[in-house]
Image (spheres, rainbow, N blue to C red):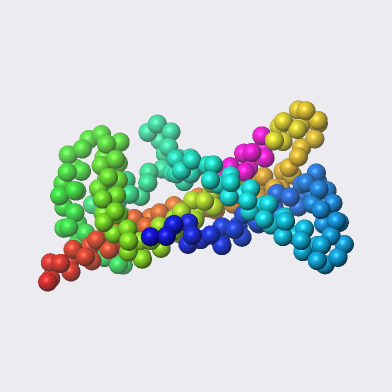
Amino acid sequence: MASTKEGYQEEFKSFTLALALVIVLPSTSLGAFSGFLFALGDSSLGFLACYATFIALAYSIGITIDCLIPYQLKDWLIYPRIGRFGISRPGSTIFSDLRSGRVNDCRFSASDALEIYSSIIDRLETIDDPDIALRFQNAQWYKLYRKHAQLESVQSANRAFLYGRDLCALPATLSLLMAAANCLTLCASGYVLFARGSIVVCVAFALVGSISARLKGKRLVTSVIACDVSETISKEHR
């Protein structure tokens, strides 16, 4: 199977460039540098060469930073958790959600799902510790995911989730780096390197990416359940 990220590489490249423009254009110091760069290209060919250099540099920096962000941090940004407080992964609550009727997906019947996963739900009812219950459900769901990971519907849902996660992680990390750089330059030289608007826009992008990833994460979880329910029913009717 090809790398999952290849499914949204072009979209992520465009997003990285957009972030670069958001950071550079409002910032006075960086704007002066980019203006100097473009001034070097008096001809149309020179301007295109400078523009291509800027795109390549922005994309390379964005990809490098994205590769340096641990996947644990990316997951935490989507599902932050401190102690017992936080947002649970949809795979950690899917069976309790099925039991309580909180799953509404037109691709499978809730009654069929309850019947197929009755043993898991019965086992879940005997677990008193909430953390153990979350880990148990996620482990059971992940077994189903591994079983159906090669299906196109599951791969598509997974790509959408990972894309949303990257849309959150990169601007969130950049906003923290810009804030830290501003603190250093303010203390050292009395001015800020990055415009406040650039940081605000990056934070907004991160919030939108986080919301998108949570929605796509739920879709991924229910897509796996839908595939498994459909396969189980088909085998029973043979």
Residue pushed farthest top? 187
**Which sits in the foreground, 218 or 98?**
218
Dominant SS in magenta: helix
Asked if 65 appears above or below 180 in the picture, the reply is: below
Q: Which quarter of the figure is the C terminus placed in?
A: bottom left
Q: Is residue 163 visible?
A: yes
Relative height, residue 43 to residue 95 (above, below):
below
Residue 46 lies in magenta, yes or no?
no
x and y percent of residue 46 in the render? Answer: 82, 62
Magenta highlight range? 172-180
User: Where residue 95 appears, x then y in whole percent?
Assistant: 26, 50
Decide if residue 47 is on the left or right side of residue 233: right
Res 114 → quadrant: bottom left
Is-magenta flag for residue 174?
yes
The residue that appears at 54% across and 42% down in the rendered structure is: 68
Residue under the image location 81 percent in, 31 percent down: 190
> For the N terminus, which image quadrant?
bottom left
Query: Is residue 215 visible to us here?
Result: no
Q: For residue 87, which quarter of the picture?
A: top left
Number of labelled discs?
Answer: 0
